[in-house]
Image (tube, grey):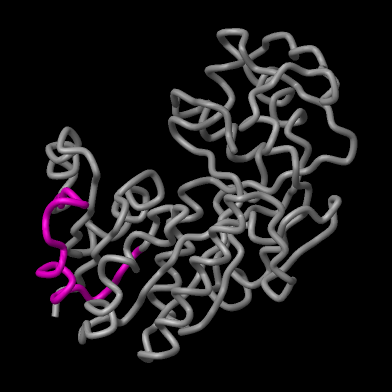
Amino acid sequence: MTPHLLSFGQGYCAQALARLLLPQGWRITGTTRSADKVAILRDTGIAPLVWPGEDPRPALSTATHLLLSVAPGQDGDPVLAALADDIAEAKNLRWIGYLSTTGVYGDQGGGWVDETSPLTPSTQRGQLRVQAETAWRALADANDLPLMIFRLAGIYGPGRGPFAKVRNGTARRIIKPGQVFSRIHVDDIARVLAASIDRPDPSAVYNLCDDDPAPPEDVIAHAARLLGLPVPPAEPFETAEMSKMARSFYAESKRVDNTRIKTALGVQLLYPDYRAGLAALLADNSKDQSPA
């Protein structure tokens, strides 16, 4: 049987995975909320499905793999709400991947977390992800579904990096003492997902991040130096003018351990730290926006 991936939310990470799978002969169906993106998906070799709107059940009936990257809302996970019974009855599924976030661990004051750490989210986004993880796990356990959960750190890559903001002078170095973030290049996310598809381990949870949690201001400074431009001045977090959303990203500080993707899946990161990732982006002349 030709492997068939049904991807709910054919966005940035799903597109990176598709670039690995399509040359191997995979069939991929990807959902989008925008009819304007149908042609773009079709041009990349993906069968587009406008959802909500079109019926995904025919694709689900033949899918061997299911990727879930739709964010939950106040009413829970929209895929579960619409299709839980159909997914429970899908007979061909060999792998289900749910893309979550390391935000489920909450603020650890810069301390380390791994997949066994308690889930103590301190933001609403993190709380909704914990609820969604729990709901997906309950469905999987009740129906013997091969669910794996992937907790993603801040994502960067082509089209998402600091260079554009450094070039146009909008990059900011917000200093909050002790603040560190973990991050990961989108191509490494795709490689972890592909490795899991090759080695499915139902009920497994994986942290996806690189080897070097770092203060966000260090990333901006390094990008400026790579471009040969002045390093943006430091701004104290306490007095910096920021939107509520931007300020919320500084509510949590933690270092995320990625040992499991290496030991369990045999993944060797292409970009083990932001320096390697930014160098590759610059070499590719990518158009970037700042990494999460």
What segment carries the magenta color? 48-67
Relative image position of residue 269 (x, y in whole percent): 57, 56
Give coordinates of residue 8: x percent, y percent: 29, 58
Q: Residue at x 63, y 57 (%)?
A: 102
Q: Residue furthest front?
A: 75
Q: Nearer the viewer, residue 259 or 9?
A: 9
User: Left or right: 288 with respect to 167?
Assistant: left
Task: Locate residue 206: give its quadrant.
Answer: bottom right
Q: Residue at x 44, y 66 (%)?
A: 98
- Residue 61 falls within the magenta-colored stretch: yes
Residue 17, image quadrant? bottom left
Q: Position of residue 233 (x, y in %)?
A: 80, 12
Which image quadrant: the N terminus?
Answer: bottom left
Residue at image location 78% in from the left, 18% down from the top: 240
Is residue 152 or residue 198 the one in the foreground?
A: 152
Looking at the picture, does residue 272 appear above or below residue 140? above
Dividing the image into 4 quarters, which one contains the C terminus?
top right
Find residue 21 and report its horizontal and vertical position in percent: 28, 60
In the image, taking residue 248 as reference, residue 135 lies left or right, namely: left
User: Residue at the location (44% across, 74% down)?
Assistant: 136
Asked where in the image residue 93 lies, by quadrant, the reply is: bottom left
* Membership of 182 in magenta stretch: no
Eyeballing the image, is 238 above or below 3? above
Task: Give the number of marks.
Answer: 0
